[in-house]
Amino acid sequence: MTKTEKTLLAKGIRPTKMRSQIYKFLKRKQSAVSFSDLKKAFVQKSKTNKTANRTTFYRNLKIFEDKGLIHQINDGVGVAKYAISDENAKGKYGTDLHMHFHCTDCRKTICLPNKISEESLPRRL
């Protein structure tokens, strides 16, 4: 069993070939990835252009997000992006408490490594 399969199983996700490929792709990325970038990468990798449809990608991203494997980022440009969640950044309520940096030059969004202290957040935030 591969490390990817073990990671997916630990989160309660059945490790299909597509899920393993999506996870590996997101894990390799240093910045958050939009749905269109993810889909484009899989079409380019496929020589016959036989790749999963949009619904399959969205469904797998939703499963990953629901299980806490990835998180969705809104960086202000109007397109949702996805990145691997950091287990060490989990807060009291299971949320991934960290900030993001969006570079206006290269348009990449990265997760900043330091966890935000829950005590420093204003009440009701």
Image (cartoon, rainbow, N blue to C red):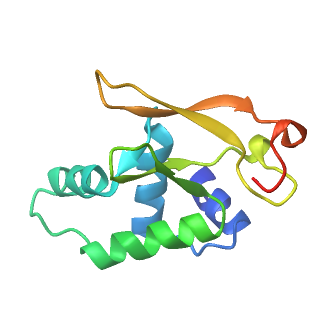
Q: Is residue 42 visible?
A: yes
Residue 32 image position (x, y, % from top left): 44, 42
Please, is residue 60 above or below residue 70 in the view? Answer: below
* Residue in the image at 75% along x and 53% along y: 125
What residue is drawn where x is 25% and y is 55%? 36
Total labels drawn: 0
Which residue is located at x 45 percent, y 38 percent? 28
Q: Which residue ends up furthest to the front in the rendered image? A: 123
- Say left or right for 98 vs 72: right
Q: Nearer the viewer, residue 100 or 40?
A: 100
Q: Is residue 109 above or below residue 49?
A: above
**Image location of residue 78, percent across then percent down:** 33, 52
* Quadrant housing residue 98: top right
In the image, residue 99 above or below residue 48: above
Which residue of the protein is positioned furthest toward the left in this rendering?
A: 48
User: What residue do we see at 24% from left, 49% from top?
Assistant: 41
Q: Is residue 2 visible to us here?
A: no
Please indicate whether residue 37 sits to the left or right of residue 46 in the image. Answer: right
In the shown orientation, is residue 58 left or right of residue 67? left
Q: Quadrant of the N terminus?
A: bottom right
Choose top left, top right, bottom left or bottom right for residue 71. Answer: bottom right
Residue 67 x, y percent position in the rendering = 65, 68
Q: Is residue 107 above or below residue 125?
A: above
Q: Residue 86 location in percent, x, y?
A: 68, 44
Residue 92 versus residue 4: which sits nearer the camera? Answer: 92
